[in-house]
Image (spheres, rainbow, N blue to C red):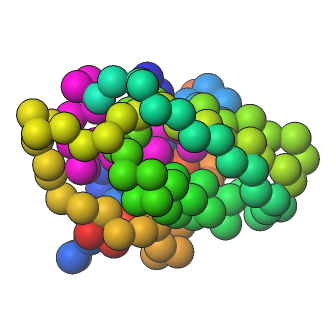
Amino acid sequence: MAAFAYFDHDADIGVIGQGKTLEEAFAGAAEATFAIMTDLTRVHGEGWVQFDFNESDLELALVTWLNTLLAEARTHGLVFGRFRLRRENSHWHGEAWGEPWREDLERGVEVKGATLTMLRVSRGPDGFEARCVVDV
């Protein structure tokens, strides 16, 4: 699993993904987003989805990634617990593994979508950080 954290925001929740690579940081942001909804350690990787999108702006790519994951989860009735993203220039290929909601999966707060609020993708001495506020 990638590293993730949260930051305070008035009514919603700020998510932070961190990683040695940009793709790991985006995966961390996805983990932070879905961990708001349930305990990811209890999610089995039986179901799988993949998708592609094009975005040259890294910050907009983060929002597109998270919102596409949320849409795929809703469309397929899944909760995701593991994520992988690959990038070639402005083309992105995303994958997520999860399962249908089970009775014994505790439901946290539903995340409606990623927003442009406090959106930032940056590179530091220890790697990348990807952050934004998600609407709950």
Query: Does residue 31 lie above or below 133 as drawn?
Result: above
In the image: residue 122, left or right of residue 32? right
Could you tell me which quadrant the C terminus lies in?
bottom left
Return the x and y of residue 114 as percentages of the image width and height. 46, 67
Q: Foreground residue, 4 or 104?
A: 104
Image point (40%, 59%), residue name: 74
Query: Does residue 7 lie above or below 4 as drawn?
Result: below
Q: Foreground residue, 7 or 60?
A: 60
Image point (67%, 66%), residue name: 60
Residue 124 lies within the magenta run: no
Secondary structure, magenta segment, majority class: helix
Quadrant of the image occupied by residue 113: bottom left
Return the x and y of residue 5 as percentages of the image width and height. 33, 42
Quadrant of the image occupied by residue 22: top right
In the image: residue 115, left or right of residue 23? left
Query: Does residue 111 lie above or below 122 as drawn?
Result: below
Answer whether residue 117 is visible to the viewer in this image. yes
User: Which stretch appears magenta?
Assistant: 26-42
Q: Foreground residue, 112 or 3?
A: 112
